[in-house]
Amino acid sequence: MPELVITVARFGFLILLWIFVFTVVGVIRRDLFAGARSGRLVAAPRTVGASTGQAARPAKVKRGRAAHQLVVTAGQLAGTRITLGESQITIGRAEDSTLVITDDYASARHARLVPRDGQWFVEDLGSTNGTYLDRAKVTGPTPVPLGVPIRIGRTSLELRP
Amino acid sequence: MTAAAVPATSPVSTGEQPGVRLARSRRNAELSLLLLAMVLVAAYSATVEATVLDTVTPDFWIPAAALGLVFLGLHLIIRWLAPFADPALLPAVALLNGIGVGFLRRYDLAQAAPADREHLAIFAGTGGRQLAWTLAAVILAAALLAIMRDHRSLSRYAYTLGLAGIVLVMIPAVLPARFSEINNAKLWIRIGGFSIQPGEFAKLALLAFFAYYLVRKREVLSLASRRVLGIDFPRGRDLGPVLVVWIISLLVLVFEKDLGTSLLYFGMFVVTLYIATERVSWLLIGLILFFGGAYLAYLLGGTVGGPFANFYLRAEIWLDPFGDPYDKGYQLVQGLLTLGTGGLFGAGPGGGQPTLLPEVQTDFIFAGIGEEIGLFGLSALLVVYLLIVERGLRAALAVRDSFGKLLAGGLAFTLGLQVFVIVGGISKLIPLTGQTTPFLSAGGSSLMANWLLIAVLLRVSDGARRPVGPGGPAVRPSGGPPEQLHGAPTEVIRP
């Protein structure tokens, strides 16, 4: 093999190695920016979601006694009421939760309540201390009957008509 | 999971459509990076053959292609089982593993008689064995991805894993030396011609246990404290577990004669503790305990000898390798000279003299590779390690449950620490110790354990990046931005 070929291969390999490194960095970078951009995009169409939500609303509420309020019955926020709409309620210590609870035993994103055809489902979001529906630990999305307490740490919540 | 129990359509989903962009899995980016990595591995073997054999044999590409097929298999499994996993992890690890196989094959070429060199079989020698081990390790990683569909399921077996970890650490210390000692370090279980290094697997099991334990104890460890000199120090009684781990790691140091492993276990625990509590005092306590312990072992080794003598010897070699360059310091001196010969750009793949360096296929592989690709290439490899660690820490930041955070953060840090321990050892920054270089060194245990580590990181990053199903119950917590409320009539309440 001529010396020149080997030298080219030698340095070519090193350059290719760094090209690989920078390509990986590029993929990671694009990943970061993709996240940032769609973060903005999610925030923008709020009104679109709200209008379709309201349009679909009358069909849902008809069935039986639907829940209209979420009431905190125990804990620091006892007595607080939230009017329920069509959107989910997130509960946790994080500032952007719908219901921000300052309970030592609550996680940042602790649980959420999701409406499905007029029925509300509670779901644990991987909290440290768990969410309990009455006495049972919530493992997957669980339907919440009216008046049954959801327990998160020292806080207790109920759905009311 | 239970997602199917609830109708998938919902009025909320219409407003979520732009959010779907966030859910890009980036699997195609992973595939192209993987291909680039394999091209690099093939280019490496071609250059090696051109330099060593003076010709490129027609089947130089076969090891690279075999590796490529194995990794492609894993890539397809990821597409199927963990579609939102981090796209950079697999290609980066594949590159390191491929370069490792390539270098080991190059070492076989150097060892073979000149006449046999052109006909070296694909699965022959250390390089071939490493290729087979890679296949086994990748299958193991794929199996872990298949079994563990959610990293949180690991926490159910935390105590079992913790016990298994301690047993695995202890086995080599308890076994008689003829079953466990290789090169003066009792780290092995040797059965017949076959040897495994249980400590490599133990670190994964122990870390899962640490993560689980600290998630449970986090509050008490971070809240109860005394303030001294502006730093919050924990109460005496909370120091219990960290002292237990410290004692275990010192026992490893003394009875298994291995500084690296003990540093690894202790560092792993202290850092998970730090991640769990966000208290710098744990890092300070950890560093002081470790350096105090190591210094004590050094002093005892100098005066009493006995079980501490080995550590004393290693520290002496580290302090002055050129004091006895032909006997005790031979390996380290050769390693340093090898790195020096490599210089800035190296002698070129195939251009070095790896046979002059003892243990070049395991502990000193980084020096061996360094001779041929130089500082310029070595720093690229180090950056690849850095990127793997960074992706692990990123997954830890993004995942929502604390167990996942501690698990991914701890695993990523452990990988980084292991690279530091061995690269620091061969470059005489810290006393040399028999650690393997992750993904590069020859050896099945190390390769399998590190691929399992990557499988766990892939699983956690999949959990972290997976979007919440449109408006519906999440399959698992998502790392994306919180779901927007669509201006619904809810009141945000703060106390």
Image (cartoon, coloured by chain):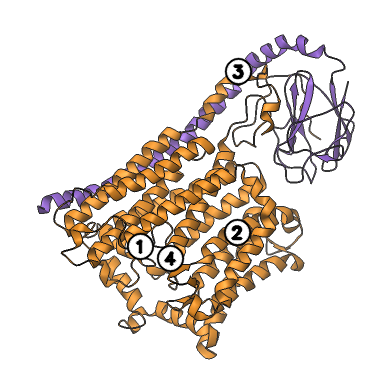
Chain colours: A purple, B orange
C-beta proximity under 8 Å, tags 4 and 1: yes
Q: Give the number of the mark in front: 3 or 4.
A: 4
Give how far across and how far down residue B404 sits, in percent.
62, 47
The amino acid on which the numbered mark 1 sits, given as a three-letter code, is Phe
Mark 4 or 1, nearer chain start: 1
Question: CA gap, disc 3 to disc 4?
Answer: 52 Å
- Compare residues B58 and A41 and report the one nearer the observer: B58
Residue A45's disc is 3
Chain letter behind tag 2? B
Residue labelled with disc 2: B205
* A110 horizontally vs A14: left or right: right
Give a yes or no on whether discs 4 and 1 share a subunit.
Answer: yes
Q: Give the number of the mark in front: 2 or 4.
A: 2
Q: Are there few (<14), some (14-19), or many (20+) residues within 10 Å of tag 4?
A: many
Residue labelled with disc 4: B422
Residue B366's disc is 1
Pick out the residue farthest to the left: A2
* B149 horizontally vs A115: left or right: left
Residue B466's disc is none
Q: Secondary structure at mark 4?
A: helix
Image point 38% across, 53% down: which residue? B97
